[in-house]
Amino acid sequence: MSLKKFVLGALGAAVVAAPFAAPAPALAEDTLYLPKLVYRTGPFAPGGIPTANGAVDYWAMINERDGGVNGAKVIVEECEFGYNTDRGVECYERTKNKNGGGLIYQPYSTGVTYALADRTRTDKIPLLTMGYGRADAGVGTAFPWVFPLMTNYWGQATGIMKYMAGEEGGMDKMKDKTIALVYLDIAYGKESIPIFRNMSEKFGFKLKEYPVVFPGLEQKATWLQIRRAKPDYIVMWGWGVMNQTAIKEAAKIKFPAEKFIGNWWAGAEQDTIPAGKAAVGYKAAAFGQPGKEFPVIQDIMKHVYGKGNGKGKDNVGQALYNRAVLTQTVIHAGILAAQEKFGVKAISAEQLRWGMENLVMDDAMATKLGVKGMAPNLKPNCADHIGGGSFYIQQWDGKKWNKVSDTLTPMEDLILPAMQDSASKYLKEKGLDAASCS
């Protein structure tokens, strides 16, 4: 069953969304203002830096190569928040009305995502949380201004479960196995817990939960507990310094690296290279391909670094850098859709929301933007703010990531009811009506 059909039937009565406001007045020239909430400092800087670099470099390339998007120059402004939720909200408030108005925000923080979900709804500014954030935001009728896209944490958890079951010879073989879930004890880390508990009950495996205190530098006691539990698999929902620390600690207790699987925020070079030999064999989910061979990356090297500019040449081609570039290409596709629909270059945030709901990232668009083969195609709509998507499992060989699984997709029979239930509760708690998709 598609998400659109599911949520329209489940959420019931709806109100018609307000008409689009007129675009904000253009500046001296047609511009598109894209503020970036970044964390180049703080405990999660190792992941924040390449993520910020990929985003900034992409738009620098577009301005240099194309003169902007259909003649509209892109203004990128960073606001440093150090992965601190309060500071992230301050950055949003400080930038949302500048330069004709911020068009879209991507906090790369589940805490900031939760904090901004209601604000962006009131302010009518899209919030892009590609591959992170609250799982129920995929229900577009409940969260019309939030776009998780690709797949959410619940879908990712069920896909990882499929992979582990495949390694064992089938889902029935998971009965009585023990899976340890090691997670950062913040909003992000807790996102996958409900669906893992659901799967534990459904498939009969034992789930052991191990929270890691923020930011994750001290884990020795946790891994002593894991050693005593003797799990068959370990799944990690980590970020930043937690990941490399966990990989080292797992090696110390001699846990087989090939049975240690991180989510896609625990699957970057910043996690494995610092861990050294301990990381060899470690696995992680991924939805975007690393590498420098893709046309978009080649164009960044030519038009940005080739001219002595750029934020971080060493990051180019890495997992987090490429993922950030992919995220910007999705915004680019949304801008193009909105410009065509409304016949203006300097679109408004409300018009971009329409563009994000109606973008089509198919082979033709992926080829146009230089990312064909980097990630799955996407086609979101009003009800479905995930838009398809899939992922795979990769393994670190000591120098690079290698794909080691077939394409993995979510268990929709588990996650769609959970998403609908959570979204319905959200609407009820907030006293909101579902948006109309008529």
Image: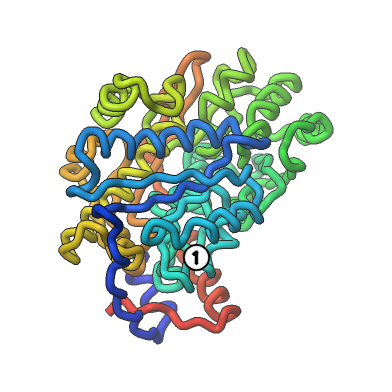
Residue 97 is left or right of residue 329, and the answer is right
Residue 196 in sight here: no
Image-based side of 140 in relation to 377, left or right? right
Quadrant the C terminus occupies: bottom left
Give the quadrant of residue 147.
Answer: bottom left
Of 392 and 16, nearer the camera is 16
Residue at image mark 1: 419
Tell whether 235 sits left or right of 146: right
Q: Is residue 222 visible?
A: yes
Query: Could you tell me which residue is drawn at 69 percent across and 20 percent down?
Result: 251
Residue 375 or residue 260, whichever sits in front: 375
State the image coordinates of residue 199 (x, y, percent, origin top left): 58, 53
Which colour assignment does the render follow? Answer: rainbow
Specify the quadrant of the image occupied by residue 368: top left
Q: Position of residue 219 (x, y in %)?
A: 78, 32
Indicate the secondary structure of the residue bearing disc 1: helix
Could you tell me residue 349's position as x and y percent?
35, 63
* Point 48% across, 66% down: residue: 120
With respect to residue 54, does 420 lie above or below? below
Q: Amino acid at mark 1?
A: Met
User: Which one is in front, 349 or 393?
Assistant: 349
Q: Quadrant of the N terminus?
A: bottom left
Mark 1 crowdedness (10 Å alpha carbons): few <14, some 14-19, many ≥20: many
131 vs 403, nearest the viewer: 131
Q: Position of residue 315 (x, y in %)?
A: 45, 24
Q: Residue at left 69%, top 50%?
A: 186
| Location of residue 34 with respect to 408 vertically, above or below | below
Residue at horizontal 62%, vertical 35%? 41
Q: Left or right: where does residue 223 sit relative to residue 86?
A: right
